[in-house]
Image (tube, helix red, strand yellow):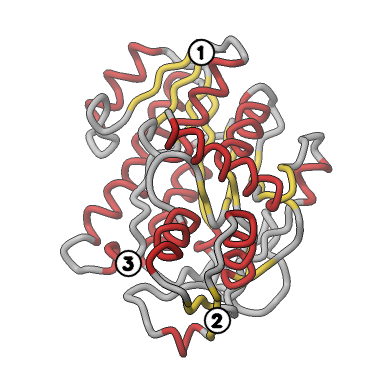
Amino acid sequence: MNVLVTGVKGQLGYDVVNECKKRGHHVCGVDVGEMDITDMGAVQRVLRKARPETVIHCAAWTAVDAAEEAENIPKVRAVNAEGTQNIATVCKELGCKMLYISTDYVFDGEGETPWQPDCTEFHPLNVYGQTKFEGELAVRNTLEKFFIVRIAWVFGRNGNNFIKTMLDLGKKYDTLRVVCDQIGTPTYTYDLARLLVDMAESEKYGCYHATNEGGYLSWYDFACEIFRQAGYATKVVPVTTAEYGLSKAKRPFNSRLDKRKLVENGFTPLPDWKDALARYLKELQNADQS
């Protein structure tokens, strides 16, 4: 299979390219230097030359708080919504599949009921969530052969994430305050990449939710397990979002994603998040030693 992956320098794109290579697929990985997704001409040139059978679209503006700044909003929309529309349009022209990576932030985060992948109620709380939802609409309204995969609490080798932040802060401080009223499940990009390529090799199109297994937890629970596995003595104090202090972007309290559709369609779920964390910490350790 001939695959084109966007956002190859990011956490997920990096792992998707490696997974494709492991399976013997021909893969072309691009980032903004090779293809500016906000430039329709560039998207047409690159995709027409590569002639992919599948595009796995990992590129996105993911700086949630920075997205709220007035001068950045047009840039965020250009990447997450208009850039996604550009790719979908050319995918339709070429007749290829498209996998679009979306987010729990498309929902309003209210209640405690897990969100269904085919939910029709969307009320994003912030600019990032709104523009990712607009990207979903672009894919859904343009293509028939598409996957929309919503993920949450992502961590991987490239870029910044919650685990790296906790490890860095844990070296500097004896005690940390972490919010305990935002609930979800982490997603390890190494595991997610396997699932995405499984999807690309199938024709079981539609919307899916994909995070690691192991149940729902808070950021506080996650931080405690990070320090336990890493062998840190750092004390973690649970606080509410209100006690922690407002950030520029509102965060959803309920990021529970229902993933039963994966099994119903024959896909293998991601491993337990604690197992994923252990493997990731080992990956970071090996990277430091190399």
Residue at (36% x, 19% y) in the render: 47
Label 3's element?
A: loop
Give the mark toward the camera: 2 or 3. 2
What's the amino acid at mark 2?
Val
Residue at (63% x, 37% y) in the render: 191
Residue at (81% x, 34% y) in the render: 266
Between discs 1 and 3, the one toward the N terminus: 1
- The location of residue 152, given as percent across then percent down, is 56, 56
Give the labeled residue for mark 2: 237
Q: Is residue 269 left or right of residue 283?
A: right
Q: Are marks 1 and 3 in contact (CB under 8 Å)?
A: no
Report the disc number at residue 2. Answer: 1
The image quarter containing residue 115 is: bottom right
Mark 3, residues whose alpha carbon is within 10 Å: few (<14), some, or many (≥20)? some
Question: As rendered, which of 164 and 46 lies closer to the eye?
Answer: 164
Label 2's element?
A: strand
**Mark pair 1, 3: CA separation:** 36 Å
Residue at (30% x, 54% y) in the render: 77
What's the amino acid at mark 3?
Asp
Q: Residue furthest left?
A: 71
Give the labeled residue for mark 3: 65
